[in-house]
Amino acid sequence: MISKDSPIGIFDSGVGGISVLRVLKHDMPNENYIFYGDSINAPYGDKTDERIREMSDSSIRFLFEHGAKAIVIACNTATSAAATYLREKYPEAIIVAMEPAVKPAVSHSDSDHPKVLVLATKSTIHGERLHHLIGRFSENAEIYPVAAPGIVPLVEAGKENSTEILSYLKELLNPFRKVSDGGEGHIVDSVVLGCTHFPFVMNKIREALSYDVTFYDGAYGTSRETKRRLEKAGLLNNSDIPGKTEIYSTAAGDDPTALAWRLLELPFDYSPEQ
Ligand code: DGL
């Protein structure tokens, strides 16, 4: 039986979902959490929708078996390829998903027609969901969707702060770098982090662009929605003691959850206005 004390279950293709877990923990510190990172199968972003649905289904089943009262799909790729399927398959469950933060990037901008760079995995960039989302805002903004398939493997290897990631980003983002830096000069106002691994390389994206941009991360909206859904279902934990977090990972090695814990403990700049 699920109750207010049951954990919120979160899954991702790997450690990216930790960037969502840290926002959830900040917003609802007294909840219990169970995180499942399917690192052995990362990246999901290069796989077929059918394969992403199968892997997401097996993650969700793991979380239900561990008593989750709600599920957070902390993965834009799994949301794009599998959220509709999972909601149809588990109609009674609370399933909250991600949405790349295009709406706040357009509506919070000071500019009348902001230039917004949307970074995500190949699967998300080519998926219908993002296509529709961009269509809703394309009259009011210049939106540039760019697939960044090289980020996830480097974050999964614990290289989120490396020179390797910086050179990859400089090359990928060359069209958006200043001409004086050797780029093509399409300067953007904001960057939407459309994959949950990407908040861990936010500083490197800033360094690669080398000018001021505002970042938008869908984790904040997902966390607010999770709280709203739990409240509505009478399942919000009202205990006044801090909750517990458990992390499971399919990563290989002696200590498969070490990277996830390290990323969870990194200081981060909480920006709820997104
Ligand atoms: N963290 C994931 C996302 O938000 C997926 C990355 C991947 O495995 O390709 O899209």
Image (cartoon, rainbow, N blue to C red):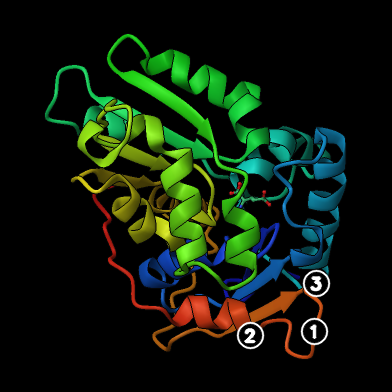
3 or 1: mark nearer the eye = 1
Secondary structure of the residue carrying numbered label 2: helix
In the rendered view, would you say 103 is above or below 55? above
Amino acid at the residue labelled 3: Thr
Q: Residues within 10 Å of mark 3 (few under 14, many from 20)?
A: some
Look at 55% across and 19% down and name the residue there: 131
Question: Would you say the beta carbon of the disc 1 residue lies within 8 angstroms of ligand 1?
Answer: no
Q: Nearer the viewer, residue 158 or 199?
A: 158
Residue identifier under label 1: 253
Sequence order check, earlier mark of 3 and 2? 3
Circle 1/circle 2 CB separation < 8 Å: yes
The image quadrant of residue 244 is bottom right
Q: Amino acid at mark 2?
A: Ala
User: Element under label 3?
Assistant: loop
Residue closest to the far left = 110
Decide if residue 222 is in sight here: no
Q: Position of residue 24 (x, y in %)?
A: 45, 65
260 vs 204, nearest the viewer: 204
Q: Is residue 74 left or right of residue 64?
A: left
x, y percentage for residue 40?
81, 65
Query: Which class describes the residues within 10 Å of circle 1: few (<14), some (14-19), or many (20+)?
Result: few
Decide: marks 3, 2 in contact (CB < 8 A)? no
The residue that disc 2 covers is: 258
